[in-house]
Amino acid sequence: MTMRSGGRILVDQLRIHGTSHVFCVPGESYLAVLDALHDSPIRTIVCRQEGGAAYMAEAAGKITGRPGIVMVTRGPGATNASCGIHVAAQDSTPLIMFVGQVARGMRDREAFQEIDCRAVFGSMAKWVAEIDRAERIPEIVSRAFHVATQGRPGPVVIALPEDMLADRVEAADALTFAPAVMKPGAADMEALRQRLLGASRPILIAGGSGWSAQGVRDLVRFAETFDLPAAVSFRRQMLFPADHPNFAGDVGIGPNPKLVERVKTADFVLLVGGRLSEMPSQGYTLLDIPGDGSKLVHIHPGAEELNKVHRAGLGILATPHAFAAAAAELPKPDAVPWAGAAGAAHAEYLAWSDTAKIKTAGNLQMAGVMAHLKEAMPADTVYCNGAGNYATWVHRFWPFRAFGSQLAPTSGTMGYGVPASVAAKALLPHREVIAFAGDGCFMMNGQEFATLMQYGLPVIVVVVDNGMYGTIRMHQEREYPNRVSATGLRNPDFAALARAHGGHGETVQHTAEFGPALERARGSGKPAIIHCLPDPEAITPARSLTDIRNAALAK
Protein backbone atom coordinates (compact mmCIF):
# COMPACT_ATOMS: atom_id res chain seq x y z
CA MET A 1 0.00 0.00 0.00
CA THR A 2 1.10 3.57 -0.66
CA MET A 3 -0.10 6.89 0.65
CA ARG A 4 -2.95 8.29 -1.45
CA SER A 5 -5.37 11.16 -1.06
CA GLY A 6 -8.99 10.33 -0.32
CA GLY A 7 -9.87 11.66 -3.77
CA ARG A 8 -7.37 9.30 -5.41
CA ILE A 9 -8.61 6.32 -3.39
CA LEU A 10 -12.19 7.07 -4.45
CA VAL A 11 -11.36 7.27 -8.14
CA ASP A 12 -9.29 4.08 -7.89
CA GLN A 13 -12.32 2.29 -6.40
CA LEU A 14 -14.54 3.47 -9.24
CA ARG A 15 -12.03 2.11 -11.73
CA ILE A 16 -11.83 -1.22 -9.89
CA HIS A 17 -15.64 -1.52 -9.96
CA GLY A 18 -15.73 -1.03 -13.73
CA THR A 19 -16.86 2.59 -14.00
CA SER A 20 -16.24 3.96 -17.48
CA HIS A 21 -17.98 7.36 -17.24
CA VAL A 22 -18.61 9.93 -14.54
CA PHE A 23 -21.20 12.67 -15.07
CA CYS A 24 -20.70 15.83 -13.05
CA VAL A 25 -20.97 19.53 -12.47
CA PRO A 26 -17.70 20.53 -10.79
CA GLY A 27 -17.59 21.98 -7.29
CA GLU A 28 -14.86 23.22 -4.97
CA SER A 29 -16.09 20.70 -2.40
CA TYR A 30 -14.57 17.75 -4.27
CA LEU A 31 -11.53 19.21 -6.02
CA ALA A 32 -9.39 16.28 -4.84
CA VAL A 33 -11.65 13.89 -6.77
CA LEU A 34 -11.54 16.06 -9.89
CA ASP A 35 -7.75 16.09 -9.65
CA ALA A 36 -7.65 12.29 -9.44
CA LEU A 37 -9.95 12.03 -12.45
CA HIS A 38 -7.49 14.15 -14.46
CA ASP A 39 -5.22 11.20 -15.29
CA SER A 40 -7.75 8.39 -14.81
CA PRO A 41 -9.02 6.19 -17.66
CA ILE A 42 -12.54 7.06 -16.50
CA ARG A 43 -14.16 9.51 -18.91
CA THR A 44 -15.53 12.61 -17.19
CA ILE A 45 -18.58 14.21 -18.83
CA VAL A 46 -19.03 17.78 -17.63
CA CYS A 47 -22.69 18.80 -17.65
CA ARG A 48 -24.52 22.12 -17.57
CA GLN A 49 -26.82 21.45 -14.62
CA GLU A 50 -26.85 18.81 -11.90
CA GLY A 51 -30.34 17.59 -12.81
CA GLY A 52 -29.07 16.75 -16.29
CA ALA A 53 -25.97 15.07 -14.85
CA ALA A 54 -28.11 12.89 -12.58
CA TYR A 55 -30.38 11.90 -15.48
CA MET A 56 -27.30 10.94 -17.49
CA ALA A 57 -26.02 8.74 -14.67
CA GLU A 58 -29.46 7.17 -14.30
CA ALA A 59 -29.56 6.44 -18.03
CA ALA A 60 -26.08 4.91 -17.78
CA GLY A 61 -27.37 2.63 -15.03
CA LYS A 62 -30.22 1.54 -17.28
CA ILE A 63 -27.88 0.86 -20.20
CA THR A 64 -25.18 -1.06 -18.35
CA GLY A 65 -26.96 -2.59 -15.35
CA ARG A 66 -24.09 -1.20 -13.24
CA PRO A 67 -24.41 1.91 -11.07
CA GLY A 68 -24.29 5.12 -13.05
CA ILE A 69 -22.05 7.66 -11.31
CA VAL A 70 -22.87 11.32 -10.77
CA MET A 71 -20.79 13.81 -8.80
CA VAL A 72 -22.14 17.09 -7.49
CA THR A 73 -21.35 19.67 -4.88
CA ARG A 74 -23.32 20.18 -1.68
CA GLY A 75 -26.44 22.29 -1.18
CA PRO A 76 -27.78 23.58 -4.51
CA GLY A 77 -25.79 20.99 -6.46
CA ALA A 78 -27.24 18.07 -4.54
CA THR A 79 -30.77 19.41 -4.51
CA ASN A 80 -30.64 20.13 -8.24
CA ALA A 81 -29.67 16.48 -8.73
CA SER A 82 -32.47 15.14 -6.53
CA CYS A 83 -34.77 14.68 -9.52
CA GLY A 84 -32.40 12.03 -10.86
CA ILE A 85 -32.38 10.25 -7.51
CA HIS A 86 -36.17 10.10 -7.57
CA VAL A 87 -36.16 8.68 -11.11
CA ALA A 88 -33.62 6.03 -10.11
CA ALA A 89 -35.75 5.10 -7.11
CA GLN A 90 -39.03 4.72 -9.00
CA ASP A 91 -37.37 3.12 -12.02
CA SER A 92 -35.28 0.71 -9.90
CA THR A 93 -32.06 1.88 -11.52
CA PRO A 94 -28.62 1.38 -9.92
CA LEU A 95 -27.03 4.79 -9.37
CA ILE A 96 -24.49 6.29 -6.97
CA MET A 97 -24.34 10.02 -6.32
CA PHE A 98 -21.25 11.40 -4.63
CA VAL A 99 -21.84 14.75 -2.94
CA GLY A 100 -18.99 17.04 -1.97
CA GLN A 101 -19.66 18.06 1.63
CA VAL A 102 -18.49 20.72 4.06
CA ALA A 103 -15.36 19.95 6.07
CA ARG A 104 -15.85 17.71 9.08
CA GLY A 105 -15.06 20.47 11.55
CA MET A 106 -17.82 22.66 10.12
CA ARG A 107 -20.69 20.17 10.36
CA ASP A 108 -23.99 21.21 11.92
CA ARG A 109 -23.24 24.94 11.82
CA GLU A 110 -25.16 25.61 8.59
CA ALA A 111 -21.86 26.24 6.88
CA PHE A 112 -21.74 27.49 3.30
CA GLN A 113 -24.10 25.28 1.23
CA GLU A 114 -24.21 22.66 4.00
CA ILE A 115 -26.84 19.96 3.57
CA ASP A 116 -27.87 16.97 5.66
CA CYS A 117 -27.82 14.30 2.96
CA ARG A 118 -29.40 11.66 5.18
CA ALA A 119 -32.38 13.90 5.90
CA VAL A 120 -32.78 15.12 2.32
CA PHE A 121 -32.32 11.84 0.46
CA GLY A 122 -33.33 9.30 3.11
CA SER A 123 -36.81 8.81 1.68
CA MET A 124 -35.58 8.41 -1.91
CA ALA A 125 -32.32 6.49 -1.77
CA LYS A 126 -31.72 2.89 -0.75
CA TRP A 127 -28.83 4.01 1.43
CA VAL A 128 -27.32 7.37 2.39
CA ALA A 129 -23.94 7.60 4.09
CA GLU A 130 -21.09 9.99 4.81
CA ILE A 131 -17.46 8.91 4.75
CA ASP A 132 -15.74 10.37 7.78
CA ARG A 133 -12.31 8.70 7.31
CA ALA A 134 -10.45 8.25 4.04
CA GLU A 135 -9.36 4.74 5.12
CA ARG A 136 -13.01 3.64 4.85
CA ILE A 137 -13.51 4.76 1.25
CA PRO A 138 -12.90 1.28 -0.29
CA GLU A 139 -15.28 -0.35 2.19
CA ILE A 140 -18.11 2.13 1.75
CA VAL A 141 -17.81 2.45 -2.03
CA SER A 142 -17.88 -1.34 -2.35
CA ARG A 143 -20.98 -1.46 -0.19
CA ALA A 144 -22.58 1.30 -2.27
CA PHE A 145 -22.10 -0.71 -5.48
CA HIS A 146 -23.62 -3.79 -3.90
CA VAL A 147 -26.57 -1.98 -2.31
CA ALA A 148 -27.35 -0.20 -5.59
CA THR A 149 -27.48 -3.45 -7.56
CA GLN A 150 -28.72 -6.16 -5.17
CA GLY A 151 -32.38 -6.88 -4.48
CA ARG A 152 -34.49 -4.16 -6.04
CA PRO A 153 -31.86 -1.91 -7.64
CA GLY A 154 -31.86 1.78 -6.79
CA PRO A 155 -29.86 4.88 -5.88
CA VAL A 156 -27.25 5.37 -3.17
CA VAL A 157 -26.02 8.77 -1.97
CA ILE A 158 -22.55 9.18 -0.44
CA ALA A 159 -21.42 12.46 1.14
CA LEU A 160 -17.71 13.32 0.94
CA PRO A 161 -16.38 15.90 3.43
CA GLU A 162 -13.99 18.20 1.60
CA ASP A 163 -11.13 17.81 4.07
CA MET A 164 -11.47 14.01 4.18
CA LEU A 165 -10.84 13.90 0.42
CA ALA A 166 -7.56 15.75 0.90
CA ASP A 167 -6.29 13.42 3.66
CA ARG A 168 -3.43 11.16 2.60
CA VAL A 169 -3.66 7.66 4.05
CA GLU A 170 -2.87 4.02 3.38
CA ALA A 171 -5.91 1.94 2.40
CA ALA A 172 -6.29 -1.46 0.74
CA ASP A 173 -8.42 -1.48 -2.40
CA ALA A 174 -11.65 -3.47 -2.42
CA LEU A 175 -12.34 -6.35 -4.77
CA THR A 176 -14.48 -5.70 -7.84
CA PHE A 177 -18.13 -5.73 -6.80
CA ALA A 178 -20.03 -8.92 -7.52
CA PRO A 179 -23.73 -8.64 -6.68
CA ALA A 180 -25.46 -11.74 -5.43
CA VAL A 181 -27.84 -13.24 -7.99
CA MET A 182 -31.18 -14.48 -6.71
CA LYS A 183 -32.12 -17.65 -8.62
CA PRO A 184 -35.40 -19.54 -8.55
CA GLY A 185 -35.35 -23.05 -7.14
CA ALA A 186 -36.52 -26.17 -8.94
CA ALA A 187 -39.58 -26.37 -6.68
CA ASP A 188 -40.49 -22.78 -7.57
CA MET A 189 -40.32 -23.49 -11.28
CA GLU A 190 -42.35 -26.67 -11.00
CA ALA A 191 -45.01 -24.85 -8.98
CA LEU A 192 -45.13 -22.18 -11.67
CA ARG A 193 -45.42 -24.77 -14.44
CA GLN A 194 -48.28 -26.53 -12.69
CA ARG A 195 -50.16 -23.27 -12.12
CA LEU A 196 -49.63 -22.23 -15.73
CA LEU A 197 -50.84 -25.52 -17.18
CA GLY A 198 -53.94 -25.27 -15.02
CA ALA A 199 -54.87 -21.91 -16.56
CA SER A 200 -57.00 -21.15 -19.60
CA ARG A 201 -56.34 -17.42 -20.16
CA PRO A 202 -52.72 -16.68 -19.16
CA ILE A 203 -50.66 -13.59 -19.91
CA LEU A 204 -47.03 -12.66 -19.29
CA ILE A 205 -46.01 -9.10 -18.31
CA ALA A 206 -42.31 -8.18 -18.25
CA GLY A 207 -41.12 -5.07 -16.42
CA GLY A 208 -38.68 -3.64 -13.93
CA SER A 209 -34.90 -3.55 -14.17
CA GLY A 210 -32.08 -6.03 -13.81
CA TRP A 211 -32.54 -7.53 -17.25
CA SER A 212 -29.93 -8.47 -19.84
CA ALA A 213 -30.02 -9.14 -23.56
CA GLN A 214 -29.72 -12.85 -22.84
CA GLY A 215 -32.51 -12.59 -20.29
CA VAL A 216 -34.81 -11.17 -22.95
CA ARG A 217 -33.88 -13.94 -25.36
CA ASP A 218 -34.63 -16.52 -22.67
CA LEU A 219 -37.98 -14.89 -21.91
CA VAL A 220 -38.88 -15.04 -25.59
CA ARG A 221 -37.99 -18.72 -25.67
CA PHE A 222 -40.20 -19.36 -22.62
CA ALA A 223 -43.12 -17.49 -24.22
CA GLU A 224 -42.68 -19.53 -27.40
CA THR A 225 -42.56 -22.81 -25.49
CA PHE A 226 -45.93 -22.14 -23.85
CA ASP A 227 -47.42 -20.00 -26.64
CA LEU A 228 -48.00 -17.17 -24.15
CA PRO A 229 -49.25 -13.69 -25.01
CA ALA A 230 -46.38 -11.48 -23.82
CA ALA A 231 -46.91 -7.88 -22.77
CA VAL A 232 -44.50 -5.35 -21.30
CA SER A 233 -44.92 -2.84 -18.51
CA PHE A 234 -44.93 0.96 -18.81
CA ARG A 235 -41.85 2.21 -20.67
CA ARG A 236 -40.32 -1.25 -20.72
CA GLN A 237 -41.05 -2.08 -24.37
CA MET A 238 -37.48 -3.20 -25.01
CA LEU A 239 -38.06 -6.29 -22.86
CA PHE A 240 -39.85 -8.19 -25.64
CA PRO A 241 -39.40 -7.67 -29.40
CA ALA A 242 -42.42 -5.96 -30.92
CA ASP A 243 -42.15 -7.92 -34.16
CA HIS A 244 -42.41 -11.27 -32.37
CA PRO A 245 -45.70 -13.15 -33.00
CA ASN A 246 -46.29 -13.48 -29.24
CA PHE A 247 -46.01 -9.77 -28.48
CA ALA A 248 -49.24 -8.29 -27.12
CA GLY A 249 -48.23 -4.65 -26.51
CA ASP A 250 -47.46 -2.47 -23.52
CA VAL A 251 -49.52 -1.94 -20.40
CA GLY A 252 -48.81 1.75 -19.87
CA ILE A 253 -50.49 5.12 -20.24
CA GLY A 254 -53.30 5.07 -22.79
CA PRO A 255 -52.87 1.37 -23.60
CA ASN A 256 -54.78 -0.71 -26.12
CA PRO A 257 -58.18 -1.29 -24.49
CA LYS A 258 -58.16 -4.85 -25.81
CA LEU A 259 -54.91 -5.55 -23.98
CA VAL A 260 -56.29 -4.08 -20.77
CA GLU A 261 -59.32 -6.33 -21.06
CA ARG A 262 -57.07 -9.31 -21.75
CA VAL A 263 -55.19 -8.70 -18.49
CA LYS A 264 -58.35 -8.09 -16.48
CA THR A 265 -59.95 -11.33 -17.65
CA ALA A 266 -56.79 -13.44 -17.38
CA ASP A 267 -56.82 -16.30 -14.90
CA PHE A 268 -53.00 -16.41 -14.74
CA VAL A 269 -50.85 -13.26 -14.72
CA LEU A 270 -47.10 -13.85 -14.70
CA LEU A 271 -45.43 -10.60 -13.66
CA VAL A 272 -41.66 -10.78 -14.17
CA GLY A 273 -39.44 -8.06 -12.72
CA GLY A 274 -42.02 -5.30 -12.43
CA ARG A 275 -44.11 -3.96 -9.57
CA LEU A 276 -47.43 -3.31 -11.35
CA SER A 277 -47.42 0.21 -9.95
CA GLU A 278 -49.94 2.96 -10.69
CA MET A 279 -49.38 3.46 -14.42
CA PRO A 280 -49.15 -0.15 -15.62
CA SER A 281 -51.97 -1.21 -13.27
CA GLN A 282 -54.21 1.52 -14.71
CA GLY A 283 -54.61 3.21 -11.36
CA TYR A 284 -54.45 -0.08 -9.44
CA THR A 285 -57.52 -1.44 -11.23
CA LEU A 286 -56.14 -4.38 -13.24
CA LEU A 287 -55.96 -6.70 -10.24
CA ASP A 288 -57.80 -6.69 -6.93
CA ILE A 289 -55.87 -5.28 -3.95
CA PRO A 290 -54.67 -7.17 -2.11
CA GLY A 291 -56.53 -9.96 -3.93
CA ASP A 292 -56.71 -13.63 -3.10
CA GLY A 293 -53.59 -14.59 -5.04
CA SER A 294 -55.51 -16.91 -7.33
CA LYS A 295 -54.18 -15.44 -10.57
CA LEU A 296 -50.89 -13.65 -9.85
CA VAL A 297 -47.43 -15.19 -9.98
CA HIS A 298 -44.85 -12.52 -9.19
CA ILE A 299 -41.12 -12.73 -9.92
CA HIS A 300 -39.01 -10.01 -8.29
CA PRO A 301 -35.46 -9.70 -6.88
CA GLY A 302 -36.61 -7.70 -3.85
CA ALA A 303 -38.31 -9.69 -1.08
CA GLU A 304 -39.91 -6.47 0.20
CA GLU A 305 -41.80 -6.07 -3.10
CA LEU A 306 -43.45 -9.50 -3.11
CA ASN A 307 -47.00 -9.20 -1.69
CA LYS A 308 -46.40 -5.51 -0.96
CA VAL A 309 -49.49 -4.36 -2.89
CA HIS A 310 -50.90 -7.30 -4.81
CA ARG A 311 -51.13 -10.71 -3.18
CA ALA A 312 -49.31 -13.32 -5.20
CA GLY A 313 -50.44 -16.91 -5.06
CA LEU A 314 -46.84 -17.72 -5.91
CA GLY A 315 -43.99 -15.30 -5.26
CA ILE A 316 -40.52 -16.17 -6.50
CA LEU A 317 -37.49 -14.25 -5.30
CA ALA A 318 -35.25 -14.02 -8.35
CA THR A 319 -33.60 -11.55 -10.68
CA PRO A 320 -35.41 -11.31 -14.03
CA HIS A 321 -32.58 -12.72 -16.10
CA ALA A 322 -32.03 -15.63 -13.69
CA PHE A 323 -35.73 -16.46 -13.76
CA ALA A 324 -35.85 -16.21 -17.55
CA ALA A 325 -32.90 -18.59 -17.84
CA ALA A 326 -34.72 -21.16 -15.71
CA ALA A 327 -38.05 -20.61 -17.49
CA ALA A 328 -36.44 -21.14 -20.88
CA GLU A 329 -35.52 -24.68 -19.82
CA LEU A 330 -39.05 -25.75 -18.87
CA PRO A 331 -40.28 -28.63 -21.04
CA LYS A 332 -42.70 -27.89 -23.83
CA PRO A 333 -46.22 -29.17 -23.10
CA ASP A 334 -48.01 -31.39 -25.60
CA ALA A 335 -50.79 -28.83 -25.90
CA VAL A 336 -52.16 -25.78 -24.12
CA PRO A 337 -55.84 -24.83 -23.75
CA TRP A 338 -55.14 -21.23 -24.77
CA ALA A 339 -53.69 -22.14 -28.18
CA GLY A 340 -54.04 -19.21 -30.57
CA ALA A 341 -54.29 -16.56 -27.83
CA ALA A 342 -50.79 -15.21 -28.51
CA GLY A 343 -51.48 -14.81 -32.21
CA ALA A 344 -54.75 -13.03 -31.49
CA ALA A 345 -53.08 -10.70 -29.01
CA HIS A 346 -50.34 -9.88 -31.50
CA ALA A 347 -52.92 -9.09 -34.18
CA GLU A 348 -54.59 -6.70 -31.75
CA TYR A 349 -51.23 -5.03 -31.11
CA LEU A 350 -50.55 -4.62 -34.83
CA ALA A 351 -53.94 -3.03 -35.39
CA TRP A 352 -53.43 -0.68 -32.44
CA SER A 353 -49.99 0.43 -33.66
CA ASP A 354 -50.94 0.93 -37.32
CA THR A 355 -50.02 4.51 -38.18
CA ALA A 356 -52.13 4.39 -41.36
CA LYS A 357 -55.28 4.44 -39.25
CA ILE A 358 -54.37 7.65 -37.42
CA LYS A 359 -55.45 11.08 -38.67
CA THR A 360 -55.15 14.20 -36.52
CA ALA A 361 -55.65 17.92 -37.09
CA GLY A 362 -53.06 19.92 -38.99
CA ASN A 363 -50.49 19.60 -41.75
CA LEU A 364 -47.93 17.70 -39.68
CA GLN A 365 -49.09 14.18 -38.85
CA MET A 366 -47.02 12.68 -36.06
CA ALA A 367 -48.25 9.25 -37.15
CA GLY A 368 -46.57 9.95 -40.47
CA VAL A 369 -43.39 10.97 -38.67
CA MET A 370 -43.36 7.67 -36.82
CA ALA A 371 -44.10 5.74 -40.01
CA HIS A 372 -41.05 7.32 -41.63
CA LEU A 373 -38.85 6.60 -38.61
CA LYS A 374 -39.90 2.94 -38.76
CA GLU A 375 -38.76 2.81 -42.38
CA ALA A 376 -35.57 4.84 -42.01
CA MET A 377 -34.02 4.03 -38.65
CA PRO A 378 -32.19 0.84 -37.61
CA ALA A 379 -34.01 -1.58 -35.31
CA ASP A 380 -31.48 -0.96 -32.52
CA THR A 381 -31.89 2.82 -32.51
CA VAL A 382 -31.97 4.09 -28.93
CA TYR A 383 -35.00 6.26 -28.18
CA CYS A 384 -34.90 8.64 -25.22
CA ASN A 385 -37.79 10.71 -23.92
CA GLY A 386 -39.10 12.46 -20.86
CA ALA A 387 -42.77 13.01 -20.04
CA GLY A 388 -45.63 14.49 -22.02
CA ASN A 389 -48.30 13.54 -24.53
CA TYR A 390 -45.70 13.68 -27.31
CA ALA A 391 -44.16 10.49 -25.86
CA THR A 392 -47.31 8.57 -26.83
CA TRP A 393 -46.19 8.66 -30.45
CA VAL A 394 -42.94 6.86 -29.61
CA HIS A 395 -44.39 4.36 -27.15
CA ARG A 396 -47.33 3.36 -29.31
CA PHE A 397 -45.88 3.49 -32.81
CA TRP A 398 -42.16 2.68 -32.62
CA PRO A 399 -41.66 -1.12 -32.63
CA PHE A 400 -38.98 -1.67 -29.99
CA ARG A 401 -37.04 -4.73 -31.08
CA ALA A 402 -33.63 -4.49 -29.39
CA PHE A 403 -32.61 -4.68 -25.76
CA GLY A 404 -31.12 -1.42 -24.50
CA SER A 405 -33.04 0.68 -27.03
CA GLN A 406 -35.36 2.55 -24.64
CA LEU A 407 -34.47 5.20 -22.09
CA ALA A 408 -37.62 6.65 -20.56
CA PRO A 409 -38.57 7.33 -16.93
CA THR A 410 -41.44 5.38 -15.44
CA SER A 411 -41.61 8.17 -12.86
CA GLY A 412 -42.92 10.49 -15.56
CA THR A 413 -40.29 13.18 -15.11
CA MET A 414 -39.87 15.93 -17.68
CA GLY A 415 -36.53 16.98 -19.08
CA TYR A 416 -35.09 13.45 -19.17
CA GLY A 417 -34.71 12.77 -22.89
CA VAL A 418 -31.85 15.06 -23.88
CA PRO A 419 -29.59 14.20 -20.91
CA ALA A 420 -30.34 10.50 -21.38
CA SER A 421 -29.27 10.80 -25.01
CA VAL A 422 -25.89 12.14 -23.88
CA ALA A 423 -25.30 9.00 -21.83
CA ALA A 424 -26.65 6.74 -24.56
CA LYS A 425 -24.37 8.09 -27.28
CA ALA A 426 -21.35 8.28 -24.96
CA LEU A 427 -21.74 4.65 -23.87
CA LEU A 428 -23.09 3.27 -27.17
CA PRO A 429 -21.28 5.26 -29.87
CA HIS A 430 -22.07 2.64 -32.52
CA ARG A 431 -25.83 3.02 -32.03
CA GLU A 432 -28.03 5.77 -33.46
CA VAL A 433 -29.75 7.80 -30.76
CA ILE A 434 -32.92 9.88 -31.02
CA ALA A 435 -34.24 12.02 -28.19
CA PHE A 436 -37.91 12.99 -28.29
CA ALA A 437 -38.97 16.02 -26.28
CA GLY A 438 -41.97 18.25 -26.04
CA ASP A 439 -41.38 21.98 -26.05
CA GLY A 440 -41.88 22.16 -22.28
CA CYS A 441 -39.82 19.02 -21.73
CA PHE A 442 -36.91 20.25 -23.85
CA MET A 443 -36.66 23.56 -22.05
CA MET A 444 -36.18 21.84 -18.70
CA ASN A 445 -32.80 20.35 -19.67
CA GLY A 446 -32.23 21.55 -23.22
CA GLN A 447 -28.98 23.16 -22.06
CA GLU A 448 -27.47 19.68 -22.23
CA PHE A 449 -27.54 20.06 -26.02
CA ALA A 450 -24.36 22.03 -25.31
CA THR A 451 -22.95 18.88 -23.70
CA LEU A 452 -23.74 16.93 -26.87
CA MET A 453 -21.81 19.57 -28.80
CA GLN A 454 -18.88 19.64 -26.38
CA TYR A 455 -18.27 15.92 -26.74
CA GLY A 456 -19.22 15.59 -30.41
CA LEU A 457 -22.14 13.25 -29.79
CA PRO A 458 -24.35 13.26 -32.92
CA VAL A 459 -27.77 12.74 -31.35
CA ILE A 460 -30.94 13.81 -33.15
CA VAL A 461 -33.40 15.65 -30.91
CA VAL A 462 -36.98 15.74 -32.19
CA VAL A 463 -38.76 18.62 -30.45
CA VAL A 464 -42.55 18.31 -30.71
CA ASP A 465 -43.67 21.89 -30.15
CA ASN A 466 -47.36 22.58 -29.60
CA GLY A 467 -46.85 25.73 -27.54
CA MET A 468 -48.07 24.37 -24.23
CA TYR A 469 -47.67 21.90 -21.43
CA GLY A 470 -49.85 19.52 -23.40
CA THR A 471 -50.60 16.81 -20.88
CA ILE A 472 -51.68 19.31 -18.24
CA ARG A 473 -53.74 21.22 -20.81
CA MET A 474 -55.48 17.96 -21.76
CA HIS A 475 -56.35 17.27 -18.13
CA GLN A 476 -57.34 20.89 -17.67
CA GLU A 477 -59.83 20.79 -20.55
CA ARG A 478 -61.27 17.55 -19.19
CA GLU A 479 -61.72 18.85 -15.63
CA TYR A 480 -62.10 22.61 -16.15
CA PRO A 481 -63.13 23.13 -19.79
CA ASN A 482 -62.55 26.53 -21.39
CA ARG A 483 -60.56 27.74 -18.37
CA VAL A 484 -57.01 27.63 -19.65
CA SER A 485 -54.57 28.53 -16.91
CA ALA A 486 -50.76 28.29 -16.63
CA THR A 487 -50.32 25.87 -19.53
CA GLY A 488 -49.46 28.14 -22.49
CA LEU A 489 -45.83 28.51 -23.60
CA ARG A 490 -44.00 30.93 -25.87
CA ASN A 491 -41.01 29.15 -27.37
CA PRO A 492 -37.84 30.00 -29.25
CA ASP A 493 -36.91 28.80 -32.70
CA PHE A 494 -35.43 25.46 -31.65
CA ALA A 495 -33.75 24.85 -35.02
CA ALA A 496 -32.01 28.22 -34.73
CA LEU A 497 -31.01 27.28 -31.16
CA ALA A 498 -29.29 24.17 -32.51
CA ARG A 499 -27.42 26.24 -35.07
CA ALA A 500 -26.43 28.78 -32.40
CA HIS A 501 -24.74 25.91 -30.54
CA GLY A 502 -22.94 24.90 -33.73
CA GLY A 503 -25.25 21.97 -34.40
CA HIS A 504 -27.68 21.18 -37.18
CA GLY A 505 -31.22 22.58 -37.13
CA GLU A 506 -34.35 21.77 -39.14
CA THR A 507 -37.91 23.04 -38.97
CA VAL A 508 -40.79 20.75 -40.01
CA GLN A 509 -44.35 22.00 -40.49
CA HIS A 510 -45.65 19.41 -42.99
CA THR A 511 -45.42 15.63 -42.84
CA ALA A 512 -43.57 15.41 -46.18
CA GLU A 513 -40.80 17.63 -44.82
CA PHE A 514 -39.79 15.26 -42.04
CA GLY A 515 -38.08 12.58 -44.13
CA PRO A 516 -35.68 14.95 -45.92
CA ALA A 517 -35.04 16.80 -42.64
CA LEU A 518 -34.14 13.54 -40.90
CA GLU A 519 -31.83 12.56 -43.74
CA ARG A 520 -30.01 15.90 -43.59
CA ALA A 521 -29.73 15.71 -39.81
CA ARG A 522 -28.25 12.22 -39.94
CA GLY A 523 -25.90 13.24 -42.72
CA SER A 524 -24.62 16.29 -40.86
CA GLY A 525 -22.64 14.24 -38.36
CA LYS A 526 -23.55 16.83 -35.73
CA PRO A 527 -25.96 16.98 -32.82
CA ALA A 528 -29.20 18.10 -34.42
CA ILE A 529 -32.63 19.43 -33.53
CA ILE A 530 -35.63 18.77 -35.73
CA HIS A 531 -38.22 21.31 -34.66
CA CYS A 532 -41.65 19.81 -35.37
CA LEU A 533 -44.73 22.06 -35.26
CA PRO A 534 -47.91 19.97 -35.06
CA ASP A 535 -51.34 21.51 -34.64
CA PRO A 536 -52.03 22.10 -30.92
CA GLU A 537 -55.37 20.35 -31.43
CA ALA A 538 -53.52 17.07 -32.11
CA ILE A 539 -53.10 16.31 -28.42
CA THR A 540 -53.54 12.51 -28.69
CA PRO A 541 -53.72 10.04 -31.58
CA ALA A 542 -57.46 9.59 -30.99
CA ARG A 543 -58.90 12.80 -29.53
CA SER A 544 -58.35 16.50 -30.12
CA LEU A 545 -58.43 19.21 -27.48
CA THR A 546 -61.83 20.26 -28.80
CA ASP A 547 -63.11 16.68 -28.48
CA ILE A 548 -61.96 16.53 -24.87
CA ARG A 549 -63.39 19.96 -24.06
CA ASN A 550 -66.75 19.26 -25.68
CA ALA A 551 -67.06 15.93 -23.87
CA ALA A 552 -66.45 17.71 -20.56
CA LEU A 553 -68.96 20.46 -21.34
CA ALA A 554 -71.58 17.88 -22.25
CA LYS A 555 -71.49 16.29 -18.80
Image (cartoon, grey):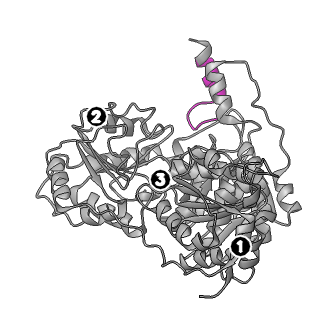
The answer to which of marks 2 and 3 sits earlier in the sequence is 3
For label 3, the residue is 236
Q: Residue at x 21, y 61 (%)?
A: 185
In the rendered image, residue 299, in percent from the top left (x then y), is placed at 31, 52
In this rendering, the label closer to the viewer, 2 or 3: 3
| Depth order, front residue of 190/34 | 34
Q: Is residue 540 visible?
A: yes
Q: Amino acid at mark 3?
A: Arg
Residue 3 x, y percent position in the rendering: 66, 85
Q: Which residues are magenta?
A: 539-551
Residue 516 image position (x, y, % from top left): 72, 61
Q: Which mark is residue 412?
A: none
Does residue 195 appear left or right of residue 93 in this picture?
left
Give the mark, 2 or 1, whose residue is nearer the N terminus: 1
Cα gap from disc 2 to disc 3, whole angstroms: 22 Å
Secondary structure under tag 2 reads: loop
Task: Please tell me the numbered disc located at residue 44.
Answer: 1
For disc 2, the marked residue is 265
Q: Secondary structure at mark 1?
A: strand
| Residue 183 located within the stretch drawn in magenta | no
Q: In the displayed structure, would residue 290 be above or below residue 189?
A: above
Q: Comparing marks 3 and 1, which lies closer to the viewer? A: 1
User: In the rendered structure, are the residues bearing label 2 and label 3 in contact, judged by CB atoms less than 8 Å apart?
Assistant: no
